[in-house]
Image (cartoon, rainbow, N blue to C red):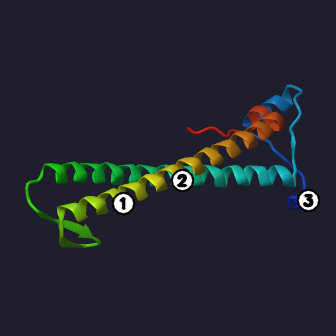
Amino acid sequence: SPRRPPPPFKEGFTLRSIGSAQSNMSGGQAEEVTWEDQQHICAFGRFNTRVHEVNAELKAKSKMAEDLDEASNELIITDEESVRYGVGETFVMVENDEAESMLESASAEVKKEIDELEAEKAELKSGMDELKGKLYKKFGHSINLEEE
């Protein structure tokens, strides 16, 4: 007799993995995945992706802050009255006092951006921890939400 195709997925499909299939053989129950569970899993994935993006941005901003501090220190020890200051892809000659002011302003802006990114990262981690708690409570070891 010809094989019939499996029915399409419906609301509330069952989460099974190798581990849960084995636990089912030993009498364990597979958990039904609801629409809300799917939304939590997707939200966790979005949060995790954004955390990785924020980490990359933080690394770049930290390097920029370090470079600005180094430039500020170099400006202090220079004995020239004017220096070349990079603006985009060009350099302009500015007085040391003006360059120092520009460096302080740029450094303050980068530090503000770093603080904002750190706050966003903490908020994302908090949301991820909340979702982990809900998902692990329902699915136990049938779901893996940990970084490799």
Viewer-side label of 1, 2: 1
The quadrant in which the C terminus is found is top right
Is residue 53 left or right of 63 when viewed as pictured? Answer: right
Three-letter code, disc 2: Glu
Viewer-side label of 1, 3: 1
Circle 2 residue: 116
- Label count reads 3
Circle 3 residue: 1
Rendered residue at 64%/51% (across/down): 47
Three-letter code, disc 3: Ser
Binning the other alpha carbons within 10 Å of mark 1 as few (below 14), some (14 to 19) or many (20 upward) gives: few
Disc with the residue nearer the chain's start (1 vs 3): 3
Rendered residue at 20%/71% (across/down): 91
Residue 65 point in image, percent of width and height: 35, 51
Circle 1 residue: 105
Residue 106 against residue 127 in the figure, above or below: below
Three-letter code, disc 1: Ser
| Cα distance in 3D space between marks 1 and 2 | 17 Å
Rendered residue at 11%/53% (across/down): 78
28 or 37, which lies in front?
Answer: 37
Viewer-side label of 3, 2: 2
Query: Dot 1: what SS?
Result: helix
Disc with the residue nearer the chain's start (3 vs 2): 3
The quadrant in which the N terminus is found is bottom right
Query: Dot 3: what SS?
Result: loop
